[in-house]
Image (tube, rainbow, N blue to C red):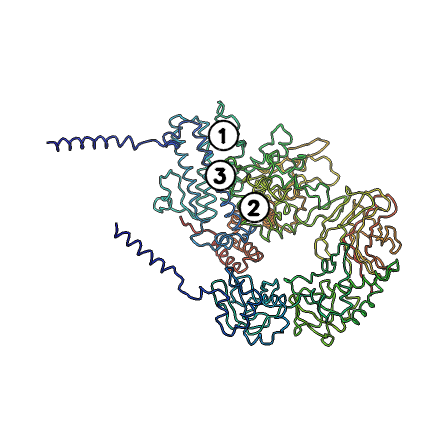
C-alpha cells in the first residue's frame, strides 16, 4: 500500500512538470514586456502616464502596436500635457482584440479609443511593423517604426478644424429638424461613423457660393422665400460631396460618381489640400463645378406603385405581368378598367422636384383590353389631375414602345409634386380605361 | 469421508444449477414477438403490412435525393455535405452513404419474410383466400417497386425473393447473380402480373368487421396509403417498352371514377378537369388577369397541402407523417430552412424553364398577352428567410400562404409518390410511343375536347371531341353538346398545361416520326414544370435516354444544370463526359 501511494504521489510531480509553463515569456504581461525592450521606454512612460499601462497589465487580452523611441521623439508636447488627448493618442495603439498579424487581407482594426486603423500585411496606417506577434501572458506585442496618430473623423473635422471653410460648415450645422437631429447626418451620410471610410469634398467659400448661385434658379419657391431656396439648393449641392469609399490623392480619378449618380469632375489643380481622417479623407477644393445636367437625373415612376386614387376602384385595378418584346424583359403594369368614373385617376407623389423644363414619356400597353381594338386617351396630370401642362395622349393598341407625351415647365421648386394618370372625361368603359407601365420625366437642360 | 459427502453435495448442487439453467435462460422477451407468435391471424398480417409501410416511409428523403438530385431540377445548397454534392456532380466515392442499397434491401427482405409467412398462413388456413390475396399482392407490389427503384439507380443488382436470415447473403454472387435492368424488369413483370389482387381496398372486404386494410389509422384514412398496383404495372411495362399494356393499366386508373354516380368524382377524379369549386386543382388568380392575385390558398398549389377533394381527385399514393407517430418526417429536414437543414433547392434550370412559359391571354384585362411565366413556379418554390425553398413537401408545415410554421414542433406532412399528373404524363408517353402522338399531345396540353374540337359553326358534336374510333385503351369520350345533349365522362378534361393556364406547346413536325419525337420532348419538359422535385425526374430522363439510345439526352441536361448552378461549373464537363459513355448508374457497394 505504501509503495502504491508513493508511486501515485511521485506520478503527481511528473504530471505537474508536464503541464508547467516553461516559456518565461508567457509569465509576463504586455506592460512588463514593453518595459523590457529599451527602445520602447518612451512608449512605456506614456502608457503609465495615460493610465493605459494598468489596463494592459491586467488579465484581459490586447494587441499592442508600440512605436519605438525615435518615432516618439517628435511628439507634440501639448498632447503629452493634455490627459484626454494623450489617452486618445495612446489608445490608438492598443486593440481590444487578440489579433495576430499574418496575411495580406486588408482590414480595419478597432482600437480601444473606438477608432479604426487600416491594417494590411505588415503595415498599420503609415507605420511598418518591424517586430510582429511577440506573445505574452495577455496578448501580442508588435513594434512599429512610426506613431499612429489619432485623427479626427469627418464630423469632428467639420466642427472643430480651423481649415474647414465657414460657408459649408455653417450649412451643414444648420441642417436640423425640429428635434435637433442633424438631417444631413441622418439622411445623406453619417460622417461620425468610424467604421466607414468616406471621401469628403469640402468647398472653399467662394466655390460654395458659386455652386449655390448656379443651382439657386432650380429651387425658386412660389412663396418667394429666398432662405428656403438657398437651403434647398445647399442640400442639392451638399448631397453629392461625400462618397462611400476612399480615394487616396495619388489615385483619385478625374471623374467620380456620387451616390446619387452625379458625375463630379475632379481637377487635380483645384485640390487645395488633403487631410487624412480617422474615417476617410477630406479634399478641400478651390472649385468643384457640377453641371445641372449631371445633377438632375430623370425620374422613372412605376405605374403599379400608385399612392392614391380618385375613388377606390381596386376591384377593377389589375396589376399585369407581361413580356415586353421591345426590351426583351418582363414588365409589370397597372390597368384600371370598368371603373365608371369620369376622369378617374391614379396618383403618384414625387418628392424634391426642381424648377425646370421636363420631357415626359410613358409606356402604356393596350393589348386589346376587353377585346377592344380601338384606341383611347389618357392624361398625365402635372400637379393637378386635369392640368393642362400636357395634353391628353392617345394610347394605340399593342404598342410596347415608350411614347413621347410632350414637354412642360415647372416654374417653381416642388418639395412634393403630385402626378396623376387621368382617364378620359366620360363613363364609357372602353374609352375611360387607364394603363401605364412607367412614366419617365427627363430634365431638359 | 467428510470430503466425499461435501463433493457429492457440491456435485449435485452443480447439476441442479445446470439443469435449471435452460429454463432460466429461455425467458421469452416481454415486449417483442417471436416468429411463431407473430403470424397467427389476419390482424397479425395487417400489422406486418403496416409495419413494412412504416419502415418504407423512412426512405422518403433517400428516394427524393436519389431521383431528383441526380437529375437536372434540384441543386444542393451551401448547407449540403460532400456526399450530396457528389450525387449532384455524378462523381460519387464508394463511402457515400446515400448510394448504399442496404436500406432498400432491408425492406425487401422484410417483404420476403412476410410473403413467406403469408403463404404459410394461407396453407394452414389462418388467412382467408381474399385476405391472403390482398396482403400478398400488396407487399409483392411494394417489393417490385423497390426493385425497380434499385434497378434505375444501380443498373445491375441481385434479385432476391426468398426470406434470408442474414442480409449480407444478398451480396453473395454465387447465390444471387446480378441482373441487368432490362432482365430485372422482365422478372418483376413475371412476378407482379399474376398477383391476384390489383384493385383498391374497399373499407370492409372480408365480410367481417375490422380486418380491412382500408381503415382509419392514427386519424388518417389508409385508402391511398398502399402502392397502386395498376400504376406499378403501368410503370413496369413502360420501362419494358410494352406501351400498349402500360397504357391499359394507366387507363384503368384514369377511368377509375368514370362510372361513379357522384358527378364531381366522375369528371374530376384522376382526370385533370376544370371545375370543382373551392376544391379546384387549376391554377387560380382570384382576379383573372391581375398577376398579383395568384391564389396561394386555393387551386393547384394547395393539392400538396389539402386533405379534401383536392387530395382525393389528384393523389393516388401518399403516406402521412405526423408528430404523433413514427417515423419522423424526413422531408422537413431536407427542404425547410426553418425547423430543417435546408439541404436542397431548385436548380436554375427549372427556374428558367418556368420563366420561359407564357400563359393564355386574359380576355378582359388584355386579350393579346398572357402572364409571361408559369405560375406553378411560384407555387412550387418560395423564398423563405431569403432562401429559395422547395415548398411542395413542406406545405403542411409552412403553409403556402405563410412564411413561418404554425407550430414549429409539429412536423406533419405527406410523402406523395404518385398523382394524377404523373398518371396522365405516363399514359401520354405510352400512347405517343404506341403511335398516338395527337392523343398524347391533347392530354398534356389543352385537353381532349379542345384538341379534337369540332370545326367552327358545327354544333352537333357527335363525331368530335372523342377518340372512340381508336382501339382500347385509347378511347376517350369527351363530348359536350346541347343538341344532341352530351356530358361525357371526359368532357371537362383540360390537359396539364391548360390547368396551369399555359398556352399549349407548338409542334413544327411535318411527319409522324417527328411528331412522336416532339411530343416526347414536350412531355419531358412538362414533367419538369408540373412535377418537379417529386422524385421522378431521373427515372423519366433515364427511360427516354435508354429508349432513344441517346446519352446526350441526359448528359446535356445535367451539363446545363451544373453550368448554371454557380457552385458546380468545374464539374460540368466531367459529368457530361461520364454520362455520354452511358455511365448512368451508381456503383453497387453492399
Residue B314 lies, in percent from the top left, at 59, 37
Can you say which quadrant of the picture contains the N terminus of chain B? top left
CA–CA distance in space, label 3 to label 1: 20 Å
Whether residue B450 is visible to the viewer of this picture, yes or no, is yes
SS class, disc 2? loop
Numbered disc 2: what chain?
Answer: B
| Along the line of sight, the residue nearer the viewer: B64 or A287 | A287
| Along the line of sight, the residue nearer the viewer: B61 or A222 | A222
Q: Is residue B167 left or right of residue B324?
A: left
Residue B526 lies, in percent from the top left, at 61, 47
| Along the line of sight, the residue nearer the viewer: B337 or B219 | B337
Above or below residue B283? Residue A231 is: below
CA–CA distance in space, label 2 to label 1: 33 Å
The residue to which callout 2 is attached is: B336
Q: Callout 2: 10 Å neighbours few (<14), some, many (20+)?
A: many
Whether residue A357 is visible to the viewer of this picture, yes or no, is no
Disc 2 and disc 1 in contact, CB within 8 angstroms: no
Which mark is on residue B137?
A: none
List the single residue furthest toward the left. Answer: B1
Numbered disc 1: what chain?
Answer: B
Question: Splitting the image into 4 quarters, where does residue B466 fall?
Answer: top right
Q: How many marks?
A: 3
The residue to which callout 1 is attached is: B213
- Please name which of the two marks, 2 or 1, marks the residue nearer to the observer: 2
The residue to which callout 3 is attached is: B327
Please report whichever mark, 2 or 1, sits nearer to the chain's N-terminal start: 1
Q: Residue at x 55, y 59 (%)?
A: B569
Question: Splitting the image into 4 quarters, where does residue B494 fall?
Answer: top right
Above or below residue A440? Residue A343 is: above
Q: Callout 1: 10 Å neighbours few (<14), some, many (20+)?
A: many
Residue B452 lies, in percent from the top left, at 67, 40
| Along the line of sight, the residue nearer the viewer: A114 or B78 | A114
Amino acid at each position: 500500500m505504501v509503495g502504491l501511494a508513493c508511486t501515485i504521489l511521485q506520478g503527481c510531480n511528473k504530471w505537474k512538470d508536464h503541464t508547467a509553463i516553461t516559456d518565461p515569456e508567457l509569465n509576463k504581461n504586455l506592460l512588463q514586456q514593453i518595459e523590457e525592450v529599451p527602445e520602447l521606454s518612451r512608449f512605456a512612460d506614456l502608457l503609465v502616464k495615460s493610465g493605459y499601462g494598468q489596463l494592459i497589465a491586467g488579465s484581459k487580452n490586447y494587441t499592442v502596436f508600440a512605436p519605438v523611441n525615435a518615432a516618439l521623439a517628435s511628439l507634440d508636447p501639448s498632447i503629452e500635457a493634455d490627459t484626454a488627448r494623450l489617452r486618445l493618442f495612446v489608445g490608438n495603439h492598443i486593440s481590444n482584440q487578440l489579433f495576430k498579424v499574418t496575411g495580406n487581407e486588408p482590414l480595419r482594426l478597432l482600437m480601444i479609443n473606438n477608432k479604426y486603423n487600416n491594417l494590411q500585411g505588415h503595415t498599420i496606417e503609415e507605420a511598418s511593423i518591424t517586430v510582429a506577434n511577440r506573445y505574452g501572458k495577455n496578448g501580442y506585442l508588435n513594434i512599429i517604426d512610426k506613431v499612429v496618430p489619432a485623427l479626427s473623423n469627418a464630423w469632428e473635422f467639420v466642427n472643430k478644424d480651423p481649415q474647414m471653410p465657414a460657408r459649408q460648415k455653417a450649412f451643414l450645422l444648420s441642417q436640423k429638424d425640429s428635434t435637433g437631429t442633424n438631417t444631413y447626418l441622418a439622411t445623406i451620410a453619417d460622417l461620425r461613423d468610424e467604421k466607414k471610410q468616406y471621401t469628403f469634398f469640402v468647398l472653399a467659400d467662394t466655390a460654395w457660393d458659386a455652386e449655390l448661385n448656379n443651382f439657386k434658379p432650380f429651387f425658386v419657391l412660389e412663396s418667394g422665400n429666398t432662405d428656403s431656396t438657398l437651403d434647398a439648393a445647399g442640400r442639392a449641392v451638399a448631397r453629392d460631396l461625400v462618397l462611400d469609399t476612399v480615394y487616396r490623392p495619388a489615385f483619385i480619378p478625374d471623374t467620380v460618381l456620387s451616390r446619387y449618380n452625379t458625375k463630379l469632375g475632379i481637377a487635380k489643380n483645384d485640390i487645395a489640400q488633403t487631410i487624412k481622417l480617422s474615417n476617410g479623407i477630406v479634399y478641400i477644393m478651390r472649385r468643384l463645378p457640377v453641371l445641372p445636367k449631371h445633377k438632375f437625373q430623370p425620374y422613372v415612376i412605376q405605374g403599379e406603385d400608385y399612392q392614391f386614387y380618385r375613388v377606390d376602384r381596386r376591384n377593377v385595378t389589375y396589376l399585369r405581368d407581361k413580356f415586353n418584346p421591345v426590351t426583351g424583359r418582363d414588365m409589370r403594369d397597372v390597368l384600371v378598367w370598368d371603373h365608371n368614373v369620369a376622369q378617374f385617376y391614379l396618383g403618384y407623389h414625387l418628392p424634391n422636384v426642381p424648377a425646370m423644363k421636363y420631357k415626359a414619356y410613358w409606356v402604356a400597353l393596350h393589348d386589346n383590353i376587353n377585346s377592344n381594338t380601338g384606341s383611347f386617351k389618357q392624361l398625365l396630370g402635372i400637379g393637378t389631375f386635369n392640368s393642362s401642362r400636357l395634353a391628353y395622349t392617345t394610347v394605340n393598341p399593342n404598342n410596347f414602345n415608350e411614347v413621347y407625351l410632350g414637354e412642360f415647365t415647372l416654374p417653381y421648386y416642388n418639395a412634393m409634386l403630385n402626378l396623376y394618370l387621368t382617364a378620359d372625361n366620360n363613363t364609357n368603359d372602353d374609352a375611360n380605361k387607364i394603363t401605364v407601365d412607367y412614366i419617365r420625366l427627363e430634365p431638359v437642360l | 469421508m467428510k470430503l466425499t459427502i461435501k463433493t457429492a453435495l457440491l456435485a449435485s448442487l452443480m447439476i441442479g444449477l445446470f439443469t435449471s439453467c435452460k429454463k432460466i435462460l429461455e425467458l421469452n422477451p416481454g415486449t417483442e414477438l417471436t416468429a411463431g407468435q407473430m403470424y397467427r391471424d389476419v390482424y397479425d398480417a395487417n400489422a406486418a403490412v403496416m409495419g413494412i409501410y412504416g419502415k418504407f416511409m423512412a426512405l422518403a428523403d433517400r428516394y427524393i435525393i436519389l431521383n431528383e438530385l441526380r437529375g437536372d431540377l434540384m441543386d444542393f445548397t451551401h448547407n449540403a455535405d460532400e456526399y450530396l454534392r457528389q450525387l449532384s456532380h455524378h462523381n460519387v466515392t464508394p463511402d457515400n452513404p446515400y448510394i448504399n442499397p442496404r436500406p432498400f434491401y432491408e425492406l425487401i427482405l422484410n417483404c420476403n419474410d412476410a410473403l413467406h409467412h403469408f403463404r404459410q398462413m394461407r396453407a394452414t388456413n389462418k388467412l382467408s383466400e381474399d385476405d391472403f390475396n390482398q396482403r400478398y399482392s400488396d407487399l409483392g407490389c411494394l417489393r417490385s417497386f423497390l426493385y425497380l427503384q434499385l434497378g434505375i439507380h444501380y443498373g445491375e443488382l441481385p434479385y432476391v425473393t426468398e426470406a434470408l436470415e442474414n442480409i449480407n447473403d444478398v451480396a453473395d454472387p454465387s447465390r444471387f447473380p446480378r441482373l441487368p435492368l432490362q432482365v430485372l424488369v422482365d422478372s418483376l413483370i413475371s412476378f407482379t402480373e399474376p398477383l391476384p389482387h390489383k384493385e383498391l381496398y374497399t373499407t370492409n372486404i372480408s365480410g367481417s368487421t375490422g380486418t380491412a386494410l382500408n381503415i382509419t389509422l392514427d386519424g388518417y384514412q389508409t385508402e391511398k396509403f398502399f402502392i397502386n398496383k395498376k400504376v406499378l404495372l403501368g410503370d413496369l411495362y413502360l420501362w419494358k417498352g410494352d406501351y400498349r399494356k402500360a397504357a391499359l393499366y394507366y387507363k384503368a386508373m384514369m377511368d377509375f371514377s368514370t362510372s361513379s354516380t357522384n358527378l364531381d368524382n366522375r369528371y374530376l377524379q384522376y382526370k385533370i378537369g376544370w371545375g370543382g369549386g373551392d376544391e379546384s386543382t387549376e391554377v387560380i388568380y382570384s382576379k383573372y388577369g391581375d398577376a398579383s392575385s395568384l391564389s396561394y390558398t386555393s387551386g393547384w398549389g394547395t393539392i400538396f397541402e389539402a386533405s379534401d377533394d383536392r387530395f382525393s381527385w389528384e393523389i393516388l399514393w401518399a403516406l402521412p407523417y405526423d408528430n404523433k407517430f413514427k417515423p419522423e418526417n424526413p422531408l422537413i429536414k431536407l427542404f425547410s430552412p426553418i425547423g430543417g437543414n435546408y439541404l436542397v433547392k431548385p436548380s436554375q434550370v427549372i427556374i428558367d424553364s418556368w420563366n420561359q412559359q407564357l400563359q393564355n391571354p386574359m380576355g378582359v384585362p388584355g386579350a393579346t398577352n398572357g402572364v409571361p411565366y408559369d405560375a406553378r413556379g411560384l407555387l412550387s418554390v418560395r423564398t423563405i428567410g431569403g432562401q429559395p425553398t422547395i415548398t411542395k413537401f413542406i406545405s403542411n408545415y409552412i403553409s403556402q400562404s405563410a412564411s413561418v410554421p404554425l407550430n414549429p414542433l409539429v412536423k406533419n406532412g405527406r410523402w406523395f409518390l404518385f398523382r394524377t399528373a404523373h398518371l396522365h404524363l405516363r399514359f401520354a408517353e405510352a400512347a405517343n410511343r404506341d403511335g398516338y402522338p395527337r392523343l398524347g399531345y391533347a392530354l398534356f396540353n389543352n385537353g381532349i375536347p379542345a384538341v379534337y374540337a369540332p370545326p367552327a359553326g358545327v354544333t352537333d358534336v357527335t363525331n368530335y371531341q372523342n377518340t372512340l374510333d381508336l382501339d382500347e385503351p385509347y378511347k376517350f369520350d369527351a363530348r359536350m353538346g346541347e343538341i344532341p345533349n352530351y356530358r361525357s365522362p371526359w368532357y371537362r378534361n383540360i390537359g396539364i398545361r391548360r390547368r396551369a393556364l399555359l398556352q399549349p406547346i407548338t409542334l413544327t413536325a411535318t411527319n409522324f416520326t417527328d411528331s412522336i419525337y416532339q411530343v416526347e420532348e414536350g412531355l419531358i419538359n412538362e414533367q419538369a414544370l408540373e412535377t418537379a422535385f417529386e422524385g421522378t425526374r431521373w427515372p423519366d430522363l433515364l427511360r427516354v435516354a435508354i429508349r432513344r439510345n441517346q446519352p446526350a439526352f441526359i448528359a446535356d441536361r445535367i451539363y446545363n444544370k451544373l453550368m448554371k448552378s454557380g457552385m458546380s461549373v468545374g464539374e460540368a464537363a466531367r459529368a457530361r463526359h461520364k454520362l455520354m459513355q452511358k455511365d448512368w448508374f451508381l456503383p453497387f457497394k453492399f
